[in-house]
Image (cartoon, grey):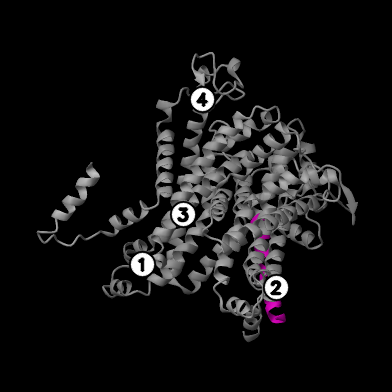
Amino acid sequence: MTVYLLRRLIQAAGVVLAMSVIVFIGVYAIGDPVEILISPDADQFERERAIRAFGLDRPLWQQYFTFLGRALQGDLGRSFVFNEPALKLILQRMPATLELAVGATVVALIIGVPLGLYAGLKPESPVSKGVMAASILGFSLPTFWVGLMLILVFAVQLGWLPSTGRGETVEVLGMRWSFLTADGLAHMVMPAVNLSLFKISLVIRLTRAGVRETMLMDFVKFARAKGLSPRRVIAVHVLKNIMIPVVTVVGLEFGGTIAFSVVTESIFAWPGMGKLIIDSINVLDRPVIVAYLMIIVLMFIVINLVVDLTYSVLDPRVRLEAKGA
Amino acid sequence: MSTTTAPSAAQAAPTPPAPPRVETPFQRFVSEFAASRLALAGLAVFTTIVLIAVLAPWIAPQNPYDLAQLDIMDSRLEPGSVGGAGFTHWLGTDDQGRDMLSGIMYGLRISLIVGAGSAVIACMVGASLGMLAAYAGGRTDSAIMRLVDLQLSFPAILAALMILAVLGKGVLNVVIALVLVEWAYYARTVRGTALVERRREYIEAAQCLALPTRRVIFRHLLPNCLPPLIVVGTMQVARAIALEATLSFLGLGVPITEPSLGLLIANGYEYMLSGKYWISFYPGIALLVTIVSINLVGDHLRDVLNPRLKR
C-alpha cells in the first residue's frame, strides 16, 4: 500500500510539473501583457519600468524558473489588476466555490440515489421510465440555459429566491460561508440545483444500473433466503455495493463540478473562483489565470488520489490486488 | 385496404421457389434503426433542423446581419407583435430590433458548423492516433495514451476555456479548442476496438499479402472499427454544440458578428431580469431540441451497433 501510494504521489508530481510548463507557456507565450497593463499614453520610461517590475523583459524560460521557484514557496505571482497575491485572491474565493460544489453533490445524491434505486427495482413501471427519460434530458439540457430559466421563473416571476450573490455569510475558521445562514442558503439553492442537474442524471443512471446488476447476485439471494426483510437487503446489502461506482464517479465528477461552476458562477454572479477566472481571462490577468490553473491541477490530482483510496476502502478486492501486486 | 391485400400477395408468392432474401448489413442496420420510433423522430427533427440551417437565407423572414433591415424602433418587441417592416415577429425581437426567429435560423448555422466541423476533425485526428496506438503498440501506444489520459483528466469546459483564453475569440479558434478537447475520446474508443480487431485473421491475411501498413490500417482495420466511432461521433457532435454554446455564453466563443445560439442566449441575459424572457428563451429551446434529437439518434445507434447486443 505504501509503495502504491508513493508511486502514485511521484506520478502526480510529474503531472503537476508537466502541466505547469504547458500552462505557463500557453498563457505567457501568446499576446503581450504590456499592452494591457500599461496605458497607451505612458511614455517609454514608464513602460520600461513597468516591464521590469513585472519581470516581462527576461527570457521565457527564466520567467518560468522564477515562477516555479516561487510557486514552490506558495507564491504564484501577483495579480496585475488587483495588485494582490494571485494565490490569496483565489484562496479567498475558494470557499464559495467549494460550498457550491459540495451543495450540488449533496443535491445530486439526495435526489439521484432514491430515484435510481426506484428505477432499478421497478424497471418496468411508468414512473421509472419517466425518470429515465428525464435523466436523458438532464444530460442534454444546456446547463447555462437552465440556469437562466431558473432565474426567470423563481427570481423574476415568482420572486421566491434571490438570483445573484452569496447573501449573508458567517465567518468560520477564517473563511466566509453562506450555508450557515438562512439568507445564504436561499442564495445557494438555485446555483446548487443548476450545477447538480448533470450529476443527478449521472447518479440516477449509475444507481439504476448498479441495482439491476446487484439484485441478481448470489449474495442478495442468500440474504433473502436468510429471511432478511427486503428493506434490510436493499439498505445494507444492495446499497453498500452500488455505492462503490457511485462514490467513484461522483468523486471524480467533483473536479468537473468545480470546473463547471465557472458557468454557474457567471450566471448567478456567485463570487467564487470560476467567476474570478472568467473576469481574469477577459482582462488577461495572467498570474491569476496561471495560479487558478495550477490550483485546479493540484485539486484534480488530490481528488483522483482520494477517490482511488476510498475505492480501495470500499471494495476489498482492490486492496487484495494491491497487496498481491 | 392495402394492408389487407399485402398478406395475400405474400401468401401467393412462395409457390415459385423464391431465392432466399439476402439482407445486406446496411439493410439490416436500417431496419434495426427504424425499429425505434423515438430514434426515427429524433432523426426527423434533426434533419429538419439541418434543413432550416441550410436554407436560412431563403426562408428566414429577415437577414439578421443586414443592418439596413434592422429598425431600432422594433427592439425588444414581444413575440407575435408586428414590427415596422410589416411582418409579424413570431418569437419577438432582441435589443437591436433583430427578428429572433431569423436570428435563431442563422444562429443554428454557426452552431451546427462549429459542432459538426469540430467533431469531424477531432474524429479524424483521434481515430488516426488511436489506430496508430493500437497498431504500433509499445512506446508509441503508451505515449499516445498518456496524452489521452492527461487530456481526459481535465474537464472539457476547463480545457476549452484555457485554449480560448490563449487563442482569443473566433469561429476557427472555437473549432480548434473543441478539436483539442475532443480528439481524446475518439482516440480511446478507436484504440479499444482496434486492439481487438488487429488480432483477427483478416488483418493477419492482409499483412501476409505484404500490403503497406497504411493500407492495412485505413482499408482493413478502420472500416471494422467504425461502429463505435459512429456512436461516439454522434454523441460528440451534441457535446460540441453544447460546449460551443456554453463558451459563447461566457463571452469566450464566437465573435458578436457571427452569433451562434449561445451568444443569442447571452444577449438576452440582461433583459431576463426585466421579464423579457424571449430573447434567451427561444434560442435555448432551439439548442435544446437540436441536442436532444442528436442524442436520441446516438442513443439508439449505440444499441443497434453494439455487437454484444446482437442476437
Image side of residue B21 versus residue B57, left or right: left
Over which residues does the magenta segment extend?
A: A1-24
Q: Nearer the viewer, mark 2 or mark 3?
A: 3
Amino acid under label 4?
Answer: Pro
The amino acid type found where label 2 is placed reads: Leu
Residue A34 shows in the view: no
Q: Identify the element where label 1 is drawn.
A: loop
Residue A231 shows in this picture: yes
Indicate the position of residue A143 as horizontal and vertical percent values: 62, 45
Q: Residues within 10 Å of mark 3 (few under 14, many from 20)?
A: some
User: Do badges 2 and 3 share one subunit?
Assistant: no
x and y, in percent, of residue B256 in the image: 58, 32
Separation of residues labelled 3 and 1 (CA atoms)? 19 Å
Which residue lies under the disc numbered 4?
B64
- Position of the N terminus of chain B by quadrant: top left
The residue at which mark 2 appears reads as A309
According to the image, label 1 marks what residue? B311
Question: Which of the two discs, 1 and 4, sits closer to the camera?
Answer: 1
Instruction: Say left or right for A298 vs B183.
Output: right
SS at mark 3?
Answer: helix
Q: Which residue is mark 3?
A: B299
The answer to which quarter of the image holds residue B71 is top right
Chain to which mark 1 belongs: B
Q: Nearer the viewer, residue B35 or A198?
A: B35
